[in-house]
Amino acid sequence: SVGLAKAALEAINGFNLFGNQGCSWSVIFVDLDAHNRNRQTLCSLLPRESRSHNTDAALLPCISYPAFALDDEVLFSQTLDKVVRKLKGKYGFKRFLRDGYRTSLEDPNRCYYKPAEIKLFDGIECEFPIFFLYMMIDGVFRGNPKQVQEYQDLLIPVLHQTTEGYPVVPKYYYVPADFVEYEKNNPGSQKRFPSNCGRDGKLFLWGQALYIIAKLLADELISPKDIDPVQRYVPLKDQRNVSMRFSNQVDNVSLREV
């Protein structure tokens, strides 16, 4: 959340709310000191997700598309490598270690876990194909065709097909209750089964939207600029200092009267 807030503030800094009809008082300015505090907080946390989580797949959209919240290339590589090393699986990425969401051992009637209960989920966390899509998109933005192809190849076997032949991205893959102990004893040995997304008449729209974006980018039907018009993906040192403000001299009569 700190990273996304930092990225949002950077993107909106200098934005004129009234466009070419605005003037100096309609421009949004971000407090520089507050922005620096956000940057320092983010960099001090990474490559960890937080004090409680060693890493988290949610860091992918933070440090890469769509936020591009990190300017430090070394810290970016360390964070990305840790996410891939700790969370990548055959069917997608785990959200974080010991994540009980939608596992066979989770009690759906409770909104919280009991003390030490998360140990039960160690090794059987659900895997989410959506993060393969984030890695595909990241590869396009960073000019890494090998990464794009790698995750495209991983994605194909985990997609559903509708009766009309359209691909559907399942929300997650889980280990059935009968195979939990086998999976814990021999990680990666058991087949995981997909959620019902696409089979029950409902779609995981977040995943479907990213799938369309990733495919359009991979097939070069759109460019990174089409989905990042403010060019967040361009390193800060390479960005031109283009002001989004407009002249204080107002020609519009109605605005002059205001």
Image (cartoon, grey):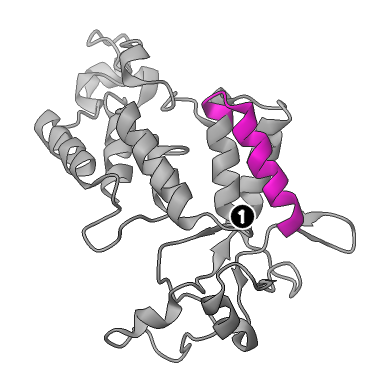
- Residue for badge 1: 207
Q: Is residue 146 magenta?
A: yes
Q: Residue at x 41, y 27 (%)?
A: 232
Furthest toward the left, the residue is 33
Predominant SS along the magenta part: helix
Q: Can residue 147 be seen in this view?
A: yes
Counting from the top left corner in percent of width and height, residue 146 is at: 63, 30
Magenta-highlighted residues: 140-159
Question: Residue 145 sits in which quadrant?
Answer: top right
- Three-letter code for the amino acid on which mark 1 is drawn: Gly
Count of numbered labels shown in the rendering: 1
Counting from the top left corner in percent of width and height, residue 77 is at: 38, 34
Furthest toward the bottom, the residue is 109
Q: In which quarter of the image is the C terminus?
A: top left
Q: Taking 51 as reference, is 151 above or below it?
A: above
Give neighbour class at mark 1: few <14, some 14-19, many 20+ (Cα, 10 Å).
many
In this image, 21 relative to 6: left or right?
A: right
Furthest toward the right, the residue is 164
Question: Residue 242 sits in which quadrant?
Answer: top left
Q: Is residue 69 visible?
A: no
Furthest toward the front, the residue is 186
Element on which disc 1 rests: helix
Counting from the top left corner in percent of width and height, residue 54 is at: 31, 57
